[in-house]
Amino acid sequence: MTRRFRLTHLDDDGRPTMVDVSEKDRTLRRAEAEGWVLLDEAVCASLDSEGTGRKGNVLRVAELAGIMAVKRTPDLIPLCHGIRIDSVSVACDLLREERRIRIRCSVTARDVTGVEMEALTGVSVAALTVYDMCKAASKAMTIEGVRLVMKSGGKSGTYRAAGVDDHENS
């Protein structure tokens, strides 16, 4: 038998609603997400070992874009609560031999709702920034594997994606 979950952002009539968090306690919430930008040879050739290309350091600009996106998540995701973010880190690592960039985003807040959407938004916008900055070299890049890696805090407790080790989440 398949268990059916009620979608919390829809009311009984199927209309969109913002979840009522007024009775929830503030607790420490943390989320980590990751994603990948697959590069072709032209993009790899256009970047030096530090990730700098014709338009500047692609990796550092993407990291900054990811941080900025985390802070704007409620403006992008219609039913996402605005929360006070305590910390954000975004890391973009060029894996030249694999012809890809790994993007990781970690978000922490002490609030009444989680930060999963913020972490996923940070990764997504960082990946889009890489694409934007490198598209002159080639448009044959692919963004893939954007996923929640870990979340902790709140009523639902801790989640860790399958196949993720603790040492990968730092």
Image (cartoon, rainbow, N blue to C red):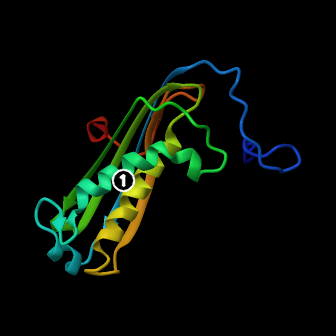
**Would residue 112 appear left or right of 91 to someone viewing this image?**
right
For mark 1, does the 10 Å Cα neighbourhood hold few (<14), some (14 to 19), or many (20 or more) residues? Answer: many
Please say if 124 is above or below 25: below
**Residue 96, percent from left and from top:** 16, 66
- For the C terminus, the image quarter is top left
Question: Residue beneath label 1, please?
Answer: 65
Which of the two residues, 40 or 18, is positioned nearer the viewer here?
18
The residue lying at 45 percent from left, 45 percent from top is 70
Considering every residue shown, the one lying at the far left of the view is 49
- Which quadrant would residue 59 be assigned to in this image? bottom left
The residue lying at 40 percent from left, 53 percent from top is 123
**Residue 143, percent from left and from top:** 40, 67
Please say if 139 is above or below 149: below
Q: What residue type is labelled 1?
A: Ala
**Residue 91, percent from left and from top:** 27, 48
**Would residue 141 appear left or right of 98 to someone viewing this image?**
right
Please say if 39 is above or below 7: below
**Residue 100, percent from left and from top:** 26, 65
Considering every residue shown, the one lying at the far right of the view is 13
The residue lying at 34 percent from left, 80 percent from top is 140
Query: What is the tally of numbered marks visible in this picture?
Result: 1
Judged from the image, the secondary structure of the residue bearing numbered disc 1 is: helix
**Would residue 77 appear left or right of 169 to someone viewing this image?**
right
